[in-house]
Amino acid sequence: HKYVYDFAEGNKDLKDLLGGKGANLAEMTNLGLPVPPGFTITTEACKAYLATGREPDGLAAQIEAHLESLEREMGRKLGDPQDPLLVSVRSGAKFSMPGMMETVLNVGLNDRSVVGLSAQAGGNDRFAWDSYRRLIQMFGKTVCEVPGEEFEHALDDAKRAKGTQNDLDLDADDLRGLVDAYKKIFAKHTGREFPQEPREQLDLAIRAVFESWNAERAVVYRRQERIPADLGTAVNVVAMVFGNLGADSGTGVAFTRDPGSGAQGIYGDYLANAQGEDVVAGIRNTVPLQELEQIDKKSYDELLDYMARLEEHYKDLCDIEFTIERGKLWMLQTRVGKRTAAAAFVIAGQLVDEGLIDLDEALHRVNGAQLAQLMFPRFQLDHEFQPVAKGIGASPGAASGKVVFTSARAVELAAEGESVILVRRETNPDDLNGMIAAKGILTSRGGKTSHAAVVARGMGKTCVSGADELDVNVPAKKFTVAGQTVNEGDVVSIDGTTGKVYLGEVPVMPSEVVQYFEGELDPEQSDDALVKAVHRIMTHADEKRRLRVRTNADTGADAARARRFGAEGIGLCRTEHMFLGDRRELVERLILASTDEEREKALAALLPLQREDFIEIFREMDGLPVTVRLIDPPLHEFLPPLEQLAVNVAVAQERGEDVAKEEALLAAVRRMHEENPMLGLRGVRLGLVIPGLFAMQVRAIAEAAVEVTRSGGSACPEIMVPLVGAVQELETVRAEAEKIIAEVVGDSGVEVLIGTMIEVPRAALTAGQIAEAAQFFSFGTNDLTQMGWGFSRDDVEGAFFWRYLELGIFGISPFESIDREGVGRLVRIAAEEGRAARPGLKLGVCGEHGGDPDSVHFFHEVGLDYVSCSPFRVPVARLEAGRAVI
Ligand code: ADP
Ligand code: MG
Ligand code: MG
């Protein structure tokens, strides 16, 4: 079994075996770039170690052989007292992963080879002792779990003793003293001396990398990111090169384009006389990469040349780690770099222009989540606003408001018309009302799957979670951050995309991407690179996709906006809002009617109002299909709450007023009370029990369609019956509806389809029968998820989803993204059996999943005709429907 690969033996496509870092080091080696020699121990070796608890047979010998050839190539032996070879031991899984073991540099140094290293560097004692103290620090911390602060404190003490802030002021003697202090710390915590044997250092470091695959932080991260638990990590052993040899040495990072905006140019940071992590650790101020041109023109030009070659080769933005050792440039890492959502679009567009990729590939490289991010308003940040804390961007958006610490206060202030930000250590179900009232939610604890994060995303509300620099004191109604105190009523601003927190009100600017979708920005005229790129890629997605995209809209205004955003019809027009406001009274009359006559009067009064609503929507959607759902929620939702009514009646009685009407209402509310309204008298059941209710709606729809068509428009209504579980329910409703439609439509040429929602599991499982009576199906995946899992969304999301996510029972909330295996299976069965019974049966989905990227791909695979989602999600669905094809 081959467990060890020389860099020259690998390539970039072997990420499974060699990890990302190893595969790319091999690729650069084979491109002829100056990578220090080294080898990679495979993920297979790691998996074997983790399965058995010991190194697999043959691994030790293979490492020995590769080490020997490395030693030959370098002309030095690992840890040799006179002229030592030193190596770094670097973890590197297929996906980069926080929580994995960090890199150990300078392996091979000990009390003797430190002298040899100094000689090697021309008698540079300072450098040698600095390298040695770094080894003990990194080895102690990452291999032996010695608390890192102890080393930090010892370093601070040494600087203080010297009267300096700068580590460069420590001389060789100071660093030798520091090595002694570090060794004592090491011995105190591990119960043994710092290992002097170079090969033992190497083996312990390799084993620690293997074991870090199962470190708790890594396990939790994988669960949350849905990275399989059995990939294992590779280990890279790389000959050391030194950026800390003096002013002609240094280390840096570079990006081939700006990962923030996508703009072309030179982006990166450089730090002279430094090693490894110093650049990102912020111990000294780095200089912009451009300045390297003055410092070392030869290395700079060489670096630019390699950057261009890497981009050309990977056909994408690359990020790079490099080190300069006495004027000689070394490449230490590259990978296709992370970037912001805006940069992803801009770069994809640029690469098409440069002929490096085609439009299909450009479409593949962006995604709906990025597009969704770009559609939120953004903070207009200039230098005066610096973040005071950075947490996790848990739910995107930009929100400013007055700080409150309790749910009750949030509700109070919001009722006065204030924007508030609810600040908590973490939220719990008691905070729900406050979360609803707040513009944004800020917590100091918890990650992307905390209660605050899950609930906020469900509500589409801006949330920053886990901003742990915040010290939140709820009883004292204040928090402190960066030495400042923020009291209740002070204004803060939070960015739910970046996780950044600002004091004061940061001005917000609208999204130019939304302006483009609204038709306010002409992509041909605009000089905005982002708008141009979005336009180009969206156009391509529209050409590619098979799925149509409709919108969920209940009003003409929503319908109009969705149409501007590219909606090709309405997939769900709810009718219940048409029973609210002033019309509540009519609904009350309907419910209280004790004779047919009274009921018919109430319905007759509702009819023209409904008709007007439909006319407005049909006009906006002229020529496009509009699916209207007959009334779905239980009627008692339109009545006043029981307690309030009871109090009113009691008070009125006290005053001796006439309460006959209120008492009747109260009796009706009591009669209609349901233990479990979600599973009660609603949807088609209501239509079958309340005579004339559905008939009135059907008539309003048909009359509106006829009127719009007669006045020169074109209305294409599709009447959708909710909550059907048995074909007989649908047949009964349909028979009545068809009579009314025939009567109203006459010879107007209007065609009205009648179909059903599939949202009860039984409907999915008897879809073959139901299709006989339905001209279309629309999957109501919200209810299908609730009934498929047997839980009610409102009750469970805040109550225990965080726990299920933490335990990995859910990778993601099944309300956010369709549960393919369970609920998705119901969809698949219903689609197949429905189409078998009625070829060409029109299939769509109108749950919120219609705007979720992963779910859109699933609906494409299952062969639905369209997805329907909220207006703002329409562009996301268009993009993902295109991506599903390529
Ligand atoms: P990470 O994945 O955290 O970036 P790396 O393995 O890339 O960890 O290493 C951490 C730092 O050490 C980086 O700055 C890297 O460039 C540097 N480094 C790693 N190996 C060597 C080496 N052989 N010589 C010099 N610097 C190295
Ligand atoms: Mg690195
Ligand atoms: Mg439903």
Image (cartoon, rainbow, N blue to C red):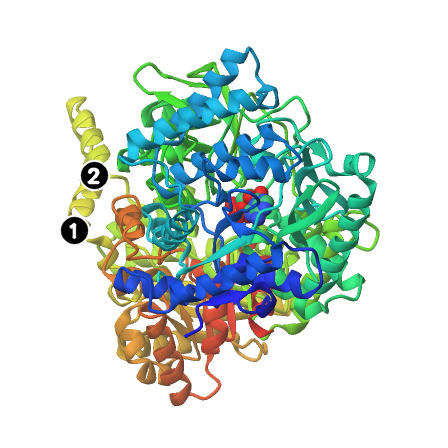
Q: Residues within 10 Å of mark 2 (few under 14, many from 20)?
A: some
The image's mark for residue 675 is: 1
| Mark 1: amino acid | Glu
Residue 300, quarter of picture? top right
* Vertical relation: 476 (above or below) 187: above
Indicate the secondary structure of the residue bearing disc 2: helix
Position in image of residue 623 (x %, y %): 63, 69
Residue occupying the point 75% across, 42% down:
327
Label 1 beta carbon within 8 A of ligand 3: no
- Left or right position of 490 against 73: left
Q: Is 63 or 505 nearer to us in this picture? A: 63
Do we see residue 571 in this rendering? Answer: no
Position in image of residue 636 (x %, y %): 26, 49
- Lower sequence index among marks 2 and 1: 2
* Vertical relation: 73 (above or below) 821: above
Residue 737, quarter of picture? bottom left
* Vertical relation: 658 (above or below) 479: below
Kindly identify which residue carries mark 2.
642
Position in image of residue 320 (x %, y %): 65, 49
Residue occupying the point 35% across, 32% down:
186
Between the C-alphas of marks 2 and 1, the distance is: 14 Å
Hey, which residue is sitting farthest front in the picture? 82
Q: Is 228 or 786 nearer to us in this picture? A: 228
- Left or right position of 662 against 58: left
Mark 2 vs mark 1, foreground winner is: 1
